Image (tube, rainbow, N blue to C red):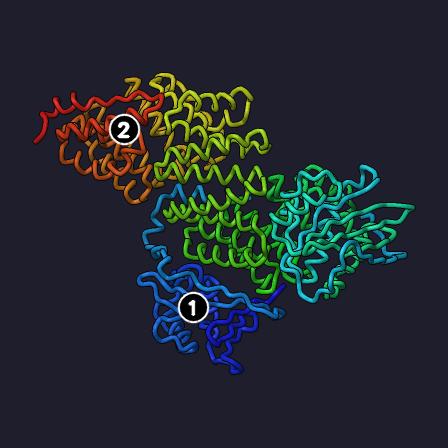
Amino acid sequence: MKAVRYRFDDFLLDPAARELWRGAERVAIVPKSLESLAYLIEHRDRAVGRDELIAAVWGRVDASDTLLTQTIWRVRRAIGDDADRSLRTVPRFGYRWVAPVRIESSQDDEATLAPAAPAEAIEPLPAIAAAASARSSRRSRLAAGALALAASIIVAVLVVKRHGAELSRESVVPSLVVVLPVSVADVSPESTWIRLGAMDYVASRLREATLNVLPSERVVAIAKAATGAAPDIDERARLASLTKADYLLAPRAELAGGVWRFSIDAYHGGRARTYRAEAASLLPAASLAAAAFLGDTGHAVSSATTAPDAVSEVVQRLDAALLEGDIAKARALLATTDEATRRDPRVLARAGKAAFRAGRLDEAAAAFAPLVADGATVAPGLRVLGEMGLGGVGIRRHDFEDAQRHYTAAIATLGSAGDLSLQGRAYTERAVVDGSLGRVDLAVADIGRARSALERSGDPIGLASLDLNGAIIETQRGHYDEATRMFDRAIDVYGRFDIADQLAIALAGRVDTRLTVVDQAGALDSSTRGWGLLPRLEDPLLIRFLGARHVEALRRSGHLAEAARVLDRFAERGDHATADPAFGVLRAAVLVDQGKAPLALRLADGIVSDFEHAPVGSCSDTVPEAAIVLTDAALQSREPAAVAPLLARLSEFAASPQDPEWTYANDLARADLLDATGEPGADAHFAAALAYADGTGEPARIVAASAAYAAYAVRHADRARAGTLLERLTPYVALDFRAAQAAALLHAVLGETALAEAAAGEARRLAGERTSRVEPQAVAIRSGGPN
């Protein structure tokens, strides 16, 4: 892998060597200042916040501003930047590198110009306020739910032949190598593992020699339509265009006369060369062919590389099953291996991955644990897999502190020279953990580190995964536009690579974000595209996830009949979603919007029963929504006496009595009940719910709380309250039915007839199949007209 260095003015910064040179003279600079300089230059495409820089360099967020200021002052002194010429201060935010930079590698003969973006294009994010931790707990919870027969070589004959135009001998590491599935000729069904298993074996041999190789799971995602035949010229062109690969390797295997012949067709720069090897067993032949490619490109086989042994084929068979997504096949293979083989660290790593993907977390943890035990003599790469596996188990168990510890250990084991794709993944997953713990500053810093590693690795799908997780973190921060941009980047990549399941997840995430900012049209567009992927999806959990968001987007847009049909789809198929309280609540909400409140109220007992049978805490996000929807159903059914018992029963399933989500929903429900029954205290509950909504900064929640409060203000002809609520609703009148309907009534209370009629017109336009209950003229008459 190339060691990246940066040239600016007459300086050379070598982060790997931790050196700064001016001409032929080495510049004295303290380590933290050098690290700060490197981070700012690496992220010169944007402004870097002070919190992010502190987290990146010191690994924590409690370093003082004075310490950072002194560190940056030393940077400026070292490079002679006394007037923000190269390093610009972004007021009340952080710093931005603005000087042109040339990027080169230690082997490069030429440097590439990479100027900084114009300063006027800077749009820095605001520093994270201390109040960020008080943002909606729902965001944090949503952000918190994405690893024996081969013998020793007896006789090996290596034959290297050239096909097509000659390739010049290379001495530079390829920027990216893509190893395709192996084309297998005339083998028995028992050898079908070769296509993916031998592919991954070759990729691993090249990676051990420090080449930058696209992860096998990425290759499977983009080459999954291949039939097993060698790729033709069109397929090679497609794959090269998608991956931007420097080398595209197409292996072939054939068993003839008891001898395995393994070939690697290496495509590079429009030319090709074939490397051939023969051996009594498959993997030794593959190893020799890979070694021939390495030698011809100027790279010796790593000293850490071991010859295939009796366990190697078991490992590659397991990898093939895991790459296929056939967890049952992997577990069946493990069950037939002997005890000594199952204890091999390589097999343990695969066993842990298979158990994890099967949802057997205790079994997965037991397999990963020996790889990271004190004193364990395992290869660093396997230790990394063990740490990351345990990190994943921690996430699934919601033990985020334990997960954070394991990911940090994995990153430390990888080091700065470790596999870039693994670095990117480790930083990405640790960012998710820190986001779940509310450590948003640390999460943002890790997102930056992950992006740097993945961009250097040339892994577009890894970058898409980063954007997908980064979007969730940005949503936690309330940065909805940035979250949408990140979702859009992920959607673009998953769409180009035709990865249906990940595309569906990204589209569903975008739906949530657009609904939060009251962009019903944008949400419906994304949910419709996602639901169109249904025939290609197999994971029932993903289908439920996507279906629930499609129903909500349809409902918010007034497409109630279609929302009901999607719900019927789950009921007709006997899907487990029918026992998911979230689907019961959605059904009730659709019925309420259709004016069928009594039917919605009849679902209450079934919804509560589903909560009783669900795992403890698994539905706490749904309980607050159930309280609001079922209260509305009871009041519209003129059965206010049903509300209090319902709230009491639902409170048993809330995350906690003090959970802000439950408190908010309880305030809204009780305010509606008190107002409907004419009892005192409704105003205080409405005000408390609106204050919480304001604190979250979520437009959809602000609209919901304001619209509910508006009904109270209208019934009481409270003009002062009407004016306050209009301030919150007016920005959303042209976007949201509830906002338009409430605004029409509030304008009427104030005697603003023209504005009331305009808002009523928007309500009718946005109503869809909902009944608009706006009567602004009647309200104006009842309230006595204008002041």
Q: Residue furthest front?
A: 165
Q: Which mark is residue 762?
A: 2
Residue 233: % across, % down: 70, 45
Amino acid carrying label 2: it is Glu
Residue at the (35%, 39%) spot, across then down: 517
Residue at the (55%, 25%) spot, across then down: 575
Which numbered disc, 2 or 1, marks the residue that appears first in the sequence?
1
Between 568 and 645, the one nearer to me in the picture: 568
- Determine the CA span between mark 2 and mark 1: 50 Å
Q: Which residue lies furthest to the left in this view?
A: 787
Q: Do the residues labelled 2 and 1 touch (CB within 8 Å)?
A: no
Q: Which mark is residue 99?
A: 1
Residue 757: % across, % down: 20, 26
Count how many numbered circles sit on residues in the image. 2
Residue 202: % across, % down: 73, 53
Q: On the rendered structure, is 766 left or right of 55?
A: left
Amino acid carrying label 1: it is Ala
Q: State whether residue 678 is above or below residue 58.
A: above
Q: How crowded is mark 1: few (under 14 residues within 10 Å), some or many (20 or more)?
A: many
Residue 270: % across, % down: 69, 54
Between 152 and 763, the one nearer to me in the picture: 763
Between 643 and 187, the one nearer to me in the picture: 187
Q: Residues within 10 Å of mark 2 (few under 14, many from 20)?
A: many
Between 749 and 735, the one nearer to me in the picture: 735
Residue 383 in sight in this render:
no
Q: Which residue lies furthest to the right in this view?
A: 257
- Location of the C terminus by quadrant is top left
